[in-house]
Amino acid sequence: MSEQDAPTRPARSPRHWFNAPWKAGAWLYLPGFALVLSHLAPGQGHAVPLWAVGLPTAVTGAVLTTRGLRGLPAPLILHRRGVTVPAALTGHVRRVEDLGDGEVRSRSYAEYAFVDETGTARTYTAWTEEGEATGEHHRLRYDPKNPQLVRRARNFRTDLYARLTLTLLIPVPLLLAGLAMSAAALATALHPAP
């Protein structure tokens, strides 16, 4: 097996954190917190913890839900119309990342060669699956309509159901609970009881 070096990716700048999905939550959190605090009547102190916990919970649920749903199309397509073919492990590609401050992280990804059903020779680097692959017998599953969509062959139905179940059991309830707490905090602050 041969090893090749992939191009080095530059380190993320500190500005990356300001462009993360959490940015929207931060921009909503602070003005909303000020609004809740400024409109509180005596005896309505319970709105502050609702807002303090509610919006971060909603943002966390939203981010986790989108991440969970973002990965659904590939397993669904490969489960429905994917074609499984034998593949040969041709080597590993190493990607070196500069983490800043002199720290470097090296990752290894398996590279495969296979022939699709039309007889075209193709290669696939498993960028989504880090680690050294071993053995001689490998199987890949690809989409004939989009030959760039390739994954190691496995039971994609299980992957699809597991991703859906985990998304529905954890992030979606977090999102709904956070929205309910935030709405209750705003309703309590903006519509005081007589």
Image: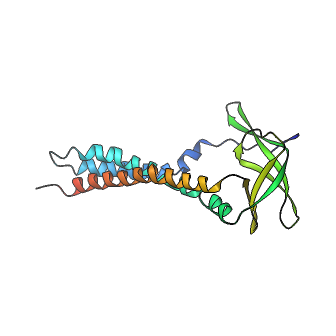
Q: Residue furthest left?
A: 194
Q: Nearer the viewer, residue 128 or 188?
A: 128
The answer to which image quadrant residue 129 occupies is top right
Q: Judge whether residue 67 can be spotted in this image.
A: no
Q: Nearer the viewer, residue 50 or 173?
A: 173
Q: Measured from the top left, where is residue 164 in percent x and y?
A: 52, 55
The residue depicted at 82 percent of the width and 50 percent of the height is 112
The residue depicted at 71 percent of the width and 63 percent of the height is 82
Q: Nearer the viewer, residue 141 or 43?
A: 141
Asked if residue 123 is positioned above or below residue 98 in the image, the reply reads below
Quarter of the figure with the C terminus = bottom left
For the image, the number of numbered tags is 0
Residue 58 left/right relative to 63: left
Q: Judge whether residue 86 can be spotted in this image.
A: yes
Residue 5 left/right relative to 70: right
Quarter of the figure with the N terminus = top right
Q: Measured from the top left, where is residue 179 in percent x and y?
A: 36, 55
Residue 69 left/right relative to 58: right
Q: Nearer the viewer, residue 55 or 120?
A: 120
The residue depicted at 50 percent of the width and 50 percent of the height is 166
Q: Measured from the top left, where is residue 85 in percent x and y?
A: 80, 57
The residue depicted at 36 percent of the width and 51 percent of the height is 178
Q: Measured from the top left, where is residue 149 in percent x and y?
A: 73, 60
- Type of colouring: rainbow
